[in-house]
Image (spheres, grey):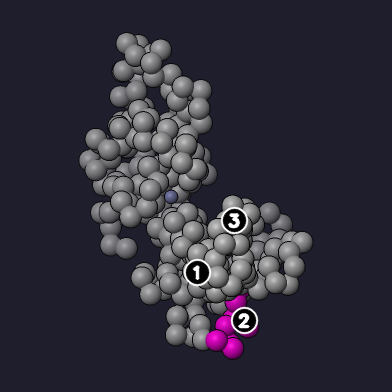
Amino acid sequence: MSMNVLTSTLAVSALLMSQLVLPPGVYGHAETVRSEPRMDWRGASPVQKQFMHSVYQGHVYRSAQRGTFVGDVASSRLARIEKQHQAQIEAAKACQELLKAARADLAQQKPEQAIQLDIEYVSIISAYRSASQQFFKWQTNFPSYYRQTRPQRSAVPGGEHGTAAVQFMIQYIGRRLAAPGYSLHNSGLAVDFGTKEGGRNLTPDTSSANVRHWRGSWLFHWLSANASRFGYYQNTSIDEPWHWEYEKVTR
Ligand SMILES: [Zn+2]
């Protein structure tokens, strides 16, 4: 990465973070628009962009009432799990041990159940991501959430961009993606696993078919039986069988 790109990337993050760390009380009414991170939605109309901003503000506000904002974690507190995936040092070490044990158990079981299991890999899809990355993920995912919810939004009082539609959208996104700074991925304490079983890639995808296949997978059963030995637990408030959280360190 060239120095210029690096400098401008850091500047963008710093800008985003300085705006994101505003305490919830600051998210007033008239001031709110000015203090928003620069949000982009290519090709959207002014009405759609305003709707996106309202949903974002509401999502952040709701998250701030329920949790504590976590800014980007210092690189000295992070360690590599494998490939490009990182977590807080202790969580990363525990996750490496967990993966090693899962793969060893799988290798042992394979000869006798090879045909039934047909598992090609056990891996990590996503671990630590900074609050800034979470913001971009939120922004990138928004247009598809918008499309997916059109029928429901159109049916509520006030129409597809009204106050009720904003509230509906906040709930819809809240079940799928945390607001920037309010995900345990942002703290470096959450891991999304991935696997391929029976020719099917099981990823962090909230479609009901994927969730169902995930729950029936060898890896999910293995994690349910063994992850706690490594300090990893499911977050039962969300229906994401791939998402496991490390609970041994103070958050
Ligand atoms: Zn996750």
In x, y percent, where is residue 162? Answer: 59, 72
Nearest to viewer (mark 2 / mark 1)? 1
Q: Main secondary structure of the magenta part?
A: loop
C-beta proximity under 8 Å, tags 1 and 3? no
- In the picture of the structure, the residue carrying the numbered disc 2 is 33
Name the one closer to the observer, 147 or 214. 147
In this image, 213 relative to 4: left or right? Answer: left
* Residue count near mark 3 (Cα–Cα under 10 Å), binned few <14, some 14–19, many ≥20: few
Residue 167 marker: 1
Q: Image quadrant for the C terminus?
A: bottom left
Secondary structure beneath label 1: helix
Q: Which residues are magenta?
A: 29-37
What amino acid is found at the position of numbered circle 2 in the picture? Val
In x, y percent, where is residue 1? Answer: 68, 54
In x, y percent, where is residue 145? Answer: 58, 55
User: At x 36% / y 39%, what residue is drawn?
Assistant: 96
User: At x 43% / y 40%, what residue is drawn?
Assistant: 211
Residue 100 visible in image: no
Residue 35 painted magenta: yes
Label 2 near ligand 1 (CB < 8 Å): no
